[in-house]
Image (cartoon, rainbow, N blue to C red):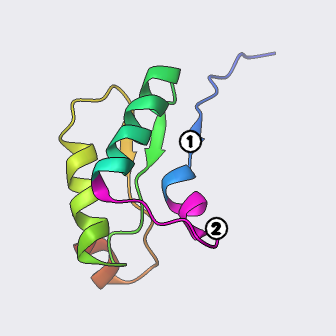
């Protein structure tokens, strides 16, 4: 049987913030991303860029933080979502 690599993709910064009463500032999201990176998470879903300017700021902060993890953004199958994520 061929061994396959398993990668961990964490969605805390998007799914976790959908919890009632939870709203993280961009700097707080960066702290969480750093902790996830320290834990060895392979891919961090930093949020949904189309959501707000604050979300885009957080994603930018995280993507420029020099983390080992790959950073991604949730998008729908819409050009506007993809453009916001880029």
Quick check: 25 above or below 51? above
Q: Residue at x 62, y 22 (%)?
A: 5
State which quadrant residue 20 falls in.
bottom right
Classify residue 77 as left or right of residue 11. Answer: left
Q: Secondary structure at mark 2?
A: loop
Q: Residues within 10 Å of mark 1 (few under 14, many from 20)?
A: some
CA–CA distance in space, label 1 to label 2: 19 Å
Q: Residue at x 64, y 27 (%)?
A: 6
Q: Which residue is mark 2?
A: 19
Q: Earlier in the sequence, mark 1 or mark 2?
A: 1
Q: Secondary structure at mark 1?
A: strand
Quick check: 50 above or below 6? below
Q: Is residue 85 visible?
A: no
Q: Position of residue 80 (x, y in %)?
A: 28, 84
Instruction: Say whether residue 16 is magenta.
Output: yes
Q: Position of residue 31 (x, y in %)?
A: 37, 39
Classify residue 34 as left or right of residue 23. Answer: left
Give whichever of 81, 55 is nearer the camera.
55
Magenta range is 14-26
Q: Residues within 10 Å of mark 2 (few under 14, many from 20)?
A: few
Q: Residue furthest front?
A: 21
Q: Please identify, in this view, whether the residue under mark 1 or under mark 2 is nearer the observer.
A: 2
State which quadrant residue 78 falls in.
bottom left
Q: Position of residue 56 (x, y in %)?
A: 25, 66
Q: Which residue is mark 1?
A: 9
Instruction: Say whether residue 32 is magenta.
Output: no
Q: Residue at x 17, y 41 (%)?
A: 64
Q: Position of residue 81 (x, y in %)?
A: 33, 78
Q: Is residue 21 visible?
A: yes
Query: Which mark, by number, is residue 42?
Result: none
């Amino acid at each position: 049987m061929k061994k396959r690599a398993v990668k961990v993709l964490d969605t805390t910064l998007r799914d976790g913030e959908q919890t009632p009463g939870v709203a993280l500032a961009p700097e707080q999201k960066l702290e969480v991303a750093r902790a996830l990176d320290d834990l060895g998470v392979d891919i961090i879903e930093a949020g949904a860029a189309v959501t707000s300017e604050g979300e885009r700021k957080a994603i930018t902060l995280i993507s420029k933080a020099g983390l080992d993890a790959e950073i991604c953004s949730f998008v729908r199958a819409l050009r506007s979502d993809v453009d916001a994520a880029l």
